[in-house]
Image (spheres, coloured by chain):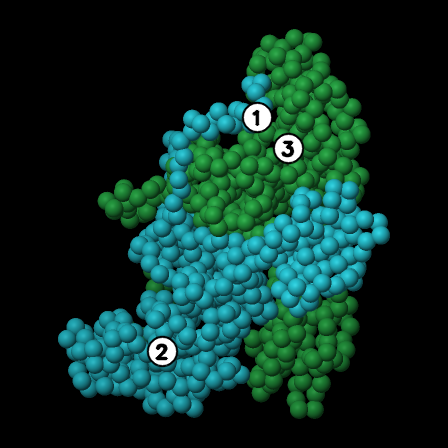
Chain colours: A cyan, B green
Amino acid sequence: MGQPAEQQQNAKKDKKTIYKPRPVSGFPEWLPEIRLVELQWLDHIRKTFESYGFCSIETPSVEELDVLLAKGETDKEIYVLNRLQATEDDAKEARLGLHFDQTVPLARYTAQHFNDLVFPFKRYQMQRVWRGERPQLGRCREFYQCDIDIINPDSLPLSFDAELPAVIFDAMSGLDIGRIKMKISNRKILIGLLDAMGVTDVIGTTRNVDKLDKIGESAVADILTKEIGLTTAQITPILELAMVKSASSKGLSLTPKNAQMEEGISELGFVLDNLSHLPEGSVVGDLSIVRGLDYYTGTVYETNLMDIPEFTSSVCSGGRYDDLAGTFINRHLPGVGISIGFTRLFDVLHHYGRIKGDKKSPADVMVVLPNDDQRAAAAQTARILRGRGMKVEMYHAPQKIGKQISYAEKKGIPFVWFPPFDAAGSHEVKNLASGEQQTVHPESWVVPS
Amino acid sequence: MGQPAEQQQNAKKDKKTIYKPRPVSGFPEWLPEIRLVELQWLDHIRKTFESYGFCSIETPSVEELDVLLAKGETDKEIYVLNRLQATEDDAKEARLGLHFDQTVPLARYTAQHFNDLVFPFKRYQMQRVWRGERPQLGRCREFYQCDIDIINPDSLPLSFDAELPAVIFDAMSGLDIGRIKMKISNRKILIGLLDAMGVTDVIGTTRNVDKLDKIGESAVADILTKEIGLTTAQITPILELAMVKSASSKGLSLTPKNAQMEEGISELGFVLDNLSHLPEGSVVGDLSIVRGLDYYTGTVYETNLMDIPEFTSSVCSGGRYDDLAGTFINRHLPGVGISIGFTRLFDVLHHYGRIKGDKKSPADVMVVLPNDDQRAAAAQTARILRGRGMKVEMYHAPQKIGKQISYAEKKGIPFVWFPPFDAAGSHEVKNLASGEQQTVHPESWVVPS
């Protein structure tokens, strides 16, 4: 020691090797100006969820591996944790994995805290989840999901199935993503029909009906004939049913073949009719929507971006399930939930150039530092503005005014505040967009909207 | 298939085994009423950071292991990720670990995006970090940190060292944590003194001076004599210096022994004098504060909770560093930063019974559902209130009014709204705390504050 810190630094620098960091594929990261938009979106979604009375929960990033695998799902590409400096003791502890969705954690949470929750339990959860998949557009290894679910022991009113699309419409229409279309169906309708016709391979049939949008009617018919072994007499009503689209119960012109199908039609009609306040075209009953079989038992949802036709995957999906947490608690817990694939949505919109980040700072105002003598006074002005709810950066050095203004411009701070340069001076504020400058008072000025 | 879903469910339930989930040690999780307080705290901290013009960034939860280990830190108990279904391809990819702080990610981020950032770069970051340590009160394996840092190439004005405690005071005094005391020092003072006296084991000496608060003056003197081999002539001025406490430059009655010491005294004085607007006792210059040697080069901060004397560890610490990202970029990047150990703070306050969670829902108002005929009208009332910025839950079923009110009480929703029960009815709202009920209009009523 003994050398000034700077000399030591330079000595160190001469010897050191630079490790140039690269982005880690599948783990997105944004510049400040894009992050600012991401935060606005997340804030809006959260505010909407809360405006319907959903409460926040957060669960740990990890669950015990036994919990993650309790439902037998092994296709989710789970990341397992190991301590770099693992000791023998580690082997005695439960193995931990990063959660791959927010539904398994919700099930575990609801079971574990069952006696402390008030039901119906309406919760939202906006966290990162992880899947070790190969990354592609809209599919990351680390991504945010924004989930809402409602859980109630024994039975859950159908009104919640109708509430979720209303929440999602409010949430998503407040983002700058263009038009969306939510497609709603009820799995009881198709499954009831298949049951009435004696179709045994329900999983295979529904999985192929789900492809209608992508490969078209005749290709689906072909597969149902050759692979599932259905007859034309069976295929025709299936495809007829899958083509049904209607915005209300009145358009669901279907003759139920059994009680299950009738129940599905009635439930879907109720859900659609309770969404009639939403703009035309934003919600539609679409019987081609099926989704994964083991999980959903009634209402199902998918959502498409109408103004980005190149991207056909759903950005917000979910549905009704009969038994959330049966593997963790001996209670019957039906629920209904929906999840915004937030990072997918944001990543796709960003990819198509639809995210305009023009502010590198959250500040509304930058206070100029006139000179060192006025530092305390300028800081006091900044505090007054902050106390009145504004976001205020004070410039850090008494540099030339042009340089100070240029900094505000580069960061996208819209207003520059000039505190008095001496005892006789006054406060002025300059709107950088218009160039307009006026005399103002820190106790009364408000940011023009 | 073919059975109604419910029968299948029951059949499944009879056979299944229940895996009763337990909390995972070191990975905290809160009930909704406590989470609501945690969110309010995080919101307040974020709002404060933004009110000073700090921009948000988020970095991935993972970094390449080479990045995490670039500074040679191996004592941080890093969690490494492995895919459960790892293939041969995985071996070709970089190994990933969960970040153990937000400083290494900031260094990597700043180096990687150097050309896209505007400097001075003022960023905040509020994320979870992970350390595979043994958990104890205030020390979790997964925890939030709330960091602010300012980075500038080549040189960074000292005014930023004075800004950080002001930000932290605003952030922390808005939380219900009682009084705090921020202790500030400047490492150049003690190191300058040691240098002037020819003390060679600077690391050993400062590390033991750092224990003054915990073990007292005579114990420290004892160690400095026996372990470091200092003479009484050396120890006396060291301990005299470490006992210096002052709220302003005027009280720093020290005679500098060399230029480094003089610089440190001058810098600390500047920082303290620029914080004179804060309440007495909230900030103090305290020369016993030293912190880790390799990293900090000037100003250092620690913060204690004054109303929880049992908990003596710092809940918010940081300092000035000369070279943020030298391992990643061939630029000299000095910075100053501070970090609120958020989960530590929250966990400790919760442990001491200081977190009162009395709301299990964010809703301001619960709208009663009078009967099924009024469902659409009640939903419309709820939408009007939401449109006016309120958080509104509509009750889900036309049950007895007493049951509906009881639900609002259990969730801690303060107001119950009665929409008209028929065409001739009016809107009324009941304050559950006071029992007061009055006729109101959804277009004009506001939540009393």
Label pair 3/1, CB-CB below 8 angstroms: no
Give the quadrant of residue B212: top right
Check disc 1 and report the residue beneath it: A5
Secondary structure of residue under mark 1: helix
Dot 3: few (<14), some (14–19), or many (≥20) neighbours within 10 Å? Answer: many
Residue A213 is tagged as: none
Residue B289 visible at all: no
* Closer to us: A138 or A50: A138
Secondary structure of residue under mark 3: strand
Q: Chain of mark 2?
A: A
Instruction: Say which residue appears at 69% left-offset and 79% top-offset.
Output: B442
Instruction: Say which residue appears at 65% left-offset and 23% top-offset.
Output: B260
Secondary structure of residue under mark 2: helix
- Up/down of A419 relative to A449, above or below: above
Residue B300 is tagged as: 3
Give the quadrant of residue B422: bottom right
Identity, as a three-letter code, of the amino acid under mark 3: Val
* Closer to us: B286 or B388: B286
Instruction: Say which residue appears at 54% left-offset and 40% top-offset.
Output: B153
Q: Chain of mark 1?
A: A
First of labels 1, 2 by sequence position: 1
Check disc 2 and report the residue beneath it: A188
Q: Are marks 3 and 1 on the same chain?
A: no
Identity, as a three-letter code, of the amino acid under mark 2: Lys
Assign the N terminus of chain A to one quadrant of the image. Answer: top right
